[in-house]
Amino acid sequence: MAVGNIILAGLAGSGKSTVGRQLALACGLAFLDLDRDTERLAGTSIRGLAAQDRWAEFRALETRALKNLAGREGLVLALGGGTLIAPDNQVAAAALGTVVWLDAPNQELAHRLESSTHLRPLLAGASGAELLARVGELRAEREPGLHICQHRLDTAGLSPRQVAIKLAQRLDLEVLELDLSAGSAPRHPAQPVQSHVALRRGAAGDGALWATHLGQASSALVLTDETVAALHGQTLTAALTAAGLRHKVVVLPPGEAAKHLGSVQQVLTEAAAFGLQRDGLVIGFGGGVVCDLAALCAALYMRGVGLLQVPTTLLAMVDAAHGGKAAVDFAGHKNLLGQFWFPRAVLVDPSFLGTLPRRELRSGLGEVLKAAVIGDADLWALLETEGEGLLEDPALLDQVIRGALRVKLRVVAADPLETGKRALLNFGHTIGHALEAATLASGEDGLTHGEAVGIGMVLEGRLAAHRGLCSEDLPQRLAATLKALGLPAAPPKLDPDAVLAHMFLDKKNAGGLLRMVLPRAAGDLLTGVEVGREEVEAVL
């Protein structure tokens, strides 16, 4: 984050805490309230300190709480109304990050305070003209300290969400989230209006970040697999404990073999035995299989509970954990049973990739390439130039993840329930899913999802070229990029009839016809194109 931590200052009623939480959610940061940290040090509430006239003690503890945050990163911090009166606090706040003054006219501040249920001891009992006069007195007392702020933002007439987005724009912070507030977005009470994404190394172990995204959840059921539990389970459970969340961990066998209704039944049985309630959460902690299972279990339990995803594979970080698709394999076919169920938040922590096998890392690059072809020419060029070597550079890998996520979230936001444009994300998947299922069924070493999708993109590109929709250069470029990324560009020897049998059960088909996403050029793809059996056989 270019500007470091964000420190919010202002008078009572300026919205520091509510705006701070909204800003943290929107930008994938952790939110802290300095008043709450000070109360923890004091062992009592601000109201209790005020009742005992212990203001000097409170101010000393406030300074200590602020200095305790030195060295922290990824924070949005709401200061107390009088924090910046003390010169030491001004120095500490300025050293911690970018200090922003949230302001509004006295009349509006007084109106907000009169409507608020939050008690401010210095304003207790005041209303009307008296309250307005006290706000003016506080401004005269505290405004000199606020002049250390690098930015001032007038919040008059704006909602906390609007202030947060405006502030993110002012500070050049990226809002990485899926906006589900319009269009065909779901309206179930457990479904979010915005699905937030926190992309930061160390995110999954940050208790403050977890606390920011957990909301009012009473408890959580964590779904993971044996491999992830052994490697990283302690990191997650320690963070959940630090965030104060009661939780239970359910561990499944790793891989596609666990993606079936029996696993769903096992997880739901564990949830009921644990006593997970309607205000609880299901947390998916693993790769694509775990994320899909967690989403389906969250959708089914008590007719729907909240969902958080913590992807641990590259493929899940750029694709499977986002977008709300929940599914299991059935009757030998991939993702035949499923539902849309969107996560409240996705914590993307690339540090998990350090323990991922090389083949799985390369597999994730197949989905990154798909995103690049759909909507990011610069990302495709980067993949071509750097090839598999980008996996050795953490900063470059984080850049690639962010680029792929931008495309995914943009497409899903335009069509959350896949009634139209979202079908673009299925490029390479009609043939790719069939290849993946057919190789698994053959008993040989099956293709990974990313490998199959990569080959699927090449073959669907060739089909498009045969039709004259694109030049031959496009599938050739796709194949060359895949090879640079260490991925296969041609399918293994398979029975075409077996592959086609899987293709005819693809969810995009209708009326007995195959329907595909076919490219005309990079960034220009057609959805719902009807394709004949003979055309597919010609490219397999």
Image (tube, grey):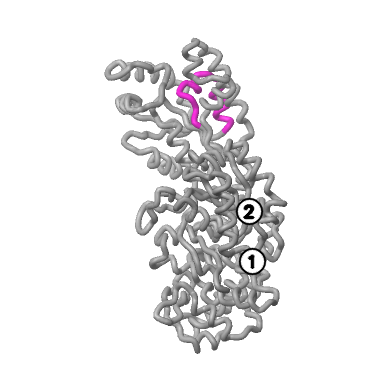
Instruction: Examine the image and state in which quarter residue 492 appears.
Output: bottom right
Q: State the SS at label 1.
A: helix
**Residue shown at 51% from the left, 58% from the top:** 296
* Magenta run includes residue 245: no
Q: Which residues are magenta?
A: 78-96
**Residue shown at 42% from the left, 33% from the top:** 152
Q: Which mark is residue 203?
A: none
Say few, some or many: other residues with alpha carbon within 10 Å of mark 2 (under 14 / 14 to 19 / 20 or more).
Answer: many
Q: Is residue 87 above or below residue 18?
A: above
Q: Observer-nearest residue: 66 or 433?
A: 433
> Can you identify the residue that label 1 sits on?
257
Q: In the image, residue 22 lies at what x, y percent? A: 45, 40
| Amino acid type, label 1 | Ala
Q: In the image, residue 331 lies at what x, y percent? A: 55, 73
Q: Observer-nearest residue: 150 or 316?
A: 316
| Amino acid type, label 2 | Thr
Q: Observer-nearest residue: 30 or 11?
A: 30
Q: In the image, residue 515 lies at what x, y percent? A: 44, 78
* Magenta run includes residue 89: yes
**Residue shown at 48% from the left, 25% from the top:** 80
Q: In the image, residue 203 lies at what x, y percent? A: 60, 45
